[in-house]
Amino acid sequence: MDIKISNLEKIYPNGNRALKDINLTIESGMFGLLGPNGAGKTTLMRILVTLLKASKGEILVDGQNLQTHRKEIRALLGYLPQDFSLFSKLTTFEFLEYCASLAGMHHSRERKKAVADMLERVGLYEVRTRQANKLSGGMKRRLGIAQALIGTPKIVIVDEPTTGLDPEERIRFRNLLAELGQKEMIIILSTHIVGDISSTCTNMALLLDGSVAFQGPPQQLLEQARGHVWKINALDQDLENLKNRYPVISTIPGQGGYDVEIVADQISDYKAKAIEPNLEHAYVYFVEQAAKTQAHHAFNINRANS
């Protein structure tokens, strides 16, 4: 099972070019789609689940063209949108049973058993009689992933699944996705939270301004930041200057001031120690380098036209 995306573009009626020449290959396992808000992640997800049509390009799902086999491919999909909502008068069990029916599970006894098993799996069986819209935020997201999984889809797509969750629920949710990622299915996790990618995905893509800026294992992105992440012990009066001059990742009170982590090609005016990068460092460094390249390119174009 794989998804091959070729030369994909999406231009909205207002002229906004949300996706620009997207080329990606997504294979079985956990695939992370990382990028800031507005990068085009949700547009790409909505095209993949057939809620939007691309303006240009081709998507093949296990060799089938998404444009000409929408119904067949839709049957393979489970989807948790960013704005997942619930029916106000249904209990947790009733809601998931309704979703199971929509997924093609028409035999009542088998459907009810599958729903009960799924609620047990996501830790919601004890609240099966509670109205679904009265669940906590974390429980609602777990019910969201349950509805995406019911009916044993081959492809599961989740859009910003951990936004708004507390740390414990976020870890629980990521662990559930990681467990599912061990099976012969594709799970696409779209997020702007770097920790969701680093702890679960073996392959990823980074979207910036509607384009694929990076594709590969997270470790490969991390290596690009090696030698460019620094720790500085700064005094109070230094903090504002540091924040104005460099991308600051974290500021932690330390001995005699603050331990400040920044990303930069080099530090010339402070005593800095190079430290081991993590994926958040790498993400910020990559975005900063991409912004510099784009600004330099724009400068050259303006100079050539003047």
Image: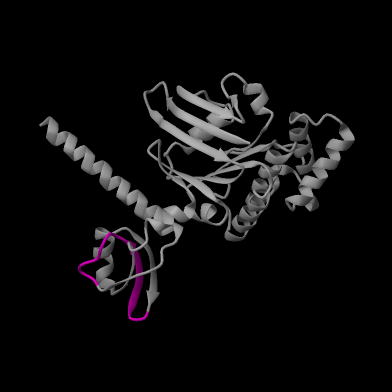
The answer to whether residue 106 is seen in the rendering is yes
Vertical placement of residue 241 versus 302, above or below: below
- The question of residue 259 being in magenta is answered with yes
Q: In terms of depth relative to the viewer, which is nearer, 72 or 184?
A: 184
Q: Is residue 129 visible?
A: no
Residue 161 spot, x, y in % from top left: 58, 46
Residue 302 place in picture, x, y as percent: 16, 34
**Is 105 situated above or below 280?**
above
User: Residue 294: x percent and y percent?
Assistant: 27, 41
Which quarter of the image is occupied by the C terminus? top left
Q: Which residues are the magenta region?
A: 255-270
163 and 27: which one is in front?
A: 27
Q: Is residue 170 left or right of residue 224?
A: right
| Residue pictured at 49% horizontal, 50% vertical | 217
| 28 sits left or right of 279 in the view | right
**Residue at 50% across / 33% down in the picture?**
44
Count of numbered labels shown in the rendering: 0
| 112 on left or right of 289 | right
View extreme (left): residue = 306
Q: Residue furthest right?
A: 109
Q: Quadrant of the N terminus?
A: top right
- Whether the magenta-drawn stretch holds residue 300 is answered as no
Whether residue 3 sits left or right of residue 250 in the image: it is: right
Relative to 232, does residue 228 appear above or below in the rendering? above
User: Residue at 20% of width from left, 67% of height from top?
Assistant: 268
Instruction: Place residue 3 in its image quadrant.
Output: top right
Q: Residue at x 41, y 63 (%)?
A: 277
Residue 173 in the image: state x and y as whole percent: 63, 53
User: Which residue, as the protein is rendered here, is positioned at the far top?
Assistant: 68
